[in-house]
Image (tube, rainbow, N blue to C red):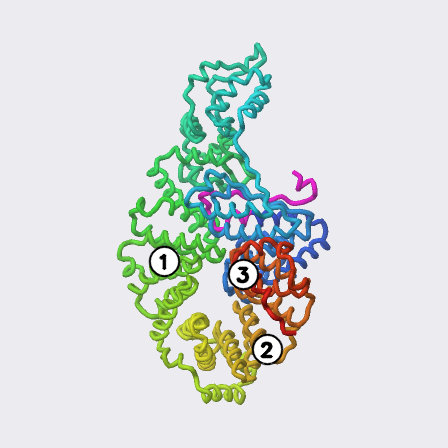
Amino acid sequence: KFTIAANGYFVSGKFDRNATRPFMVIGDVFNSMCDLFAADIQSIEQERKMAEALTKSLGRDAFLIANIVPNLSNLMPLYTSCESSSFDAASRTRYLLLTLLDTLSKLSKSITILLDDLQWIDPASLTFCRALFQSTKSNKNVFLVLCSRESEVQTQDKSEVHDWLQSLSGSTLETIHLTNLNPEDVNNLVSDSLRTWPRLTRSLSAILHGKSLGNPFFLRQTMEMLCRGGYLHYSLGERKWKWDLDEISDLRLDDNVVSLLTREMTKLPDELLVGLKAASCIGYCIPQTVVDILSKHLEMDLFGVLTSLVQRSYLAGVGSALYRFTHDRIYQAAYELMSEKQRREDHMKFGLAICSYVLDNCENNYDMMFVGVNQINRGGPEVLADSCRRVMISQLNLNAGKRALLLTDFSSALSFFGHGIMFLNPGHWDAHYQLSLDLFTSAAESACATSDAALVKSYSETILAHSRSLDDRLPALCFAVKSLKESMNLPSCRDCAIEVLTQLGEDVSSVLEIPSQETIQITNNLLMSKMTDDSMIKMSPCTQMRAVFVMRLYHELNYVYYVFDQTRLLAISLRMVSLTFEIGLTDTSSLAFANYGVELIARGYLIGSRLGTVALKLAENSKYISYVIAAVKQYNLWVIEPLHAIAESHLVGFYSGKRVGDEFSSSLNFCLHLSTSFHCGKNLIQIKNSLSEYIVQLLENSQQWFLPQSAMLYWLIVELIEGPNFDLTEHNPLILNENGVMLFAASARHLELDI
């Protein structure tokens, strides 16, 4: 009410333990936000300014979040992006959604976002909420409200949510802890409800508080049950509420609200009970389309049944297209009316009915596909013996998983692929080879994206055992190498990459030999005499998938040897450049030119700066743009460009990394931007303040990247500004409270600055 009264916008979302589609709540929140802004457009000029602001901030990348926020098309034109590759698709999506929110917040007075039942949040949405919280801390136009039920958020499988909420207690988040009502509050509520003096209701309130423990919802349901049972009734003759304390005291009431609700629900007419059970199987919200499908399947007027349940306050209508339970405890109680066996059978029947409808009438209705496939998966393969249908369900899970990948919800995608594998029949590698290969490969990809190294290993080993060719197992092998690298198991990563490269025909031992000066000179002469910059940039793309995988594997090896043995970097980058000339351009060619250029500059070959320029051009529409900017500008083009231009280039690299989801390179570029700004003599106070914010952000996000270097530079600048005896306690406490940073702070006092 306060937000709307101030001409602001209020949007809300409620997480469901059985969410029917990936990114459901976050997508609904942003779609509602776009609808509110679109409804408030009063003129063509206002519409133009809105579209211009969004186009400026999102550009063509807006198309990449259109699957999650289709209503964005009401505010701006959506163009098909010419380049949709990203370093980390999930990170890129988070950045674009937060950029959308930031842009809209600048066009309004305030936006309030309420996210309820956080205890049921899915992993992808939790990661987004972490980023959302960090971004809204500095945005005065956005007010974020997070709600959760403490007793359930502390369960073992939700410990990540609990830990995150606990970590926020010392930040700018204000915590409001809602406890149960005390006896006096219960008496006030009962007194107000019955329009009776508090002294007359005190004895009744004491009984009700003893049974409900002050839980408001439990208390309300108990009073309604007493009214329906006649234990609490209104006397028309005496014009007041009456009750018999002895009867109520002797009455056996349930120990929890779910048991109470379940017992009351069993008294409903059979038709209403069937409808209530069916609704609880679908989820907290029931779309109108699903109601129509199930009406035919159950051969009953489900619409009329749900309308009756609305009248009894079990459900509520949301517009004309949706029903929802009025409280999650009512939803839970309705679901617990059924045995585990009945639930699974109903999930399977309803899921098959919904999927059949989608396949026959609307194959592109992905929301309905997610609803149907989720229902089938909750039923499980044990309740379906039909082998043909099991194959169909495996294919549906494959389709749903691929759609979830487009929405960058890798956890949901992994779940779909996993269920698809579970529905496969015995002997599926022989009977349905391509389907099996696609499911296991996609599962390995999703497991890699969610950093589940054990699952990547399991799926990859299964593919290796059953695949019919090297080409079929190459993607899984690359996922295995990448997973080992990201889990920092670098020796295994190196060995695995070398083994795969050997299978692909590479003589890796020869490649890793440190090249002679003569070899380097021959390559450089070739570049100087036969290849212009334009001819290198316009080389034909590589069409050989094996060659593409070879380049990617050498890129992974480059990372490993950067940590283990940097003397091998020249050899690896030289091989990648040579391969590019042989096979054409691949997605990692820009990295090859950038790394080789850096190695040449380090050895005094100025041609390296030319290769750096070529790398920047090749990387313009690449997911590696941020890394290439960092490498080329800092370690290559500094020999020919002024420092202040290098500093500004790193700022471009910072935003480029955000846009493609490369958080590591983005952070590296920002660190280099600040350090280069320092060396080219920019305002020390501005650099100090930027460093302070940057270090605090690294600490709050538990990111150790470049923390030592940044802290060292911070304290060095503080000493330059305030002198060698500066007071540590006057500076940011988040920095001072970290032991690692304190060590660097202490050592900074002993640095000698050569000016």
First in sequence: mark 2 vs mark 1: 1
The quadrant where residue 658 appears: bottom right
Q: Residues within 10 Å of mark 1 (few under 14, many from 20)?
A: some
Residue for badge 3: 743
Residue for badge 2: 637
**Can residue 269 be seen?**
no
User: Between tags 1 and 3, which lies in front?
Assistant: 3
Mark-to-mark CA distance, 2 and 1: 42 Å
**In the image, residue 436 lies at what x, y percent?**
33, 59
Which span of residues is magenta-colored? 1-28
The kind of secondary structure element at disc 2 is helix
Amino acid at the residue labelled 1: Ala
Mark-to-mark CA distance, 2 and 3: 33 Å
Disc 1 + disc 3, Cβ < 8 Å: no
Residue for badge 1: 454
Disc 2 + disc 3, Cβ < 8 Å: no
**In the image, residue 241 lies at what x, y percent?**
55, 15
**From the image, which quarter does the C terminus lie in?**
bottom right
**In the image, residue 719 lies at what x, y percent?**
64, 64
Amino acid at the residue labelled 2: Leu
The kind of secondary structure element at disc 3 is helix
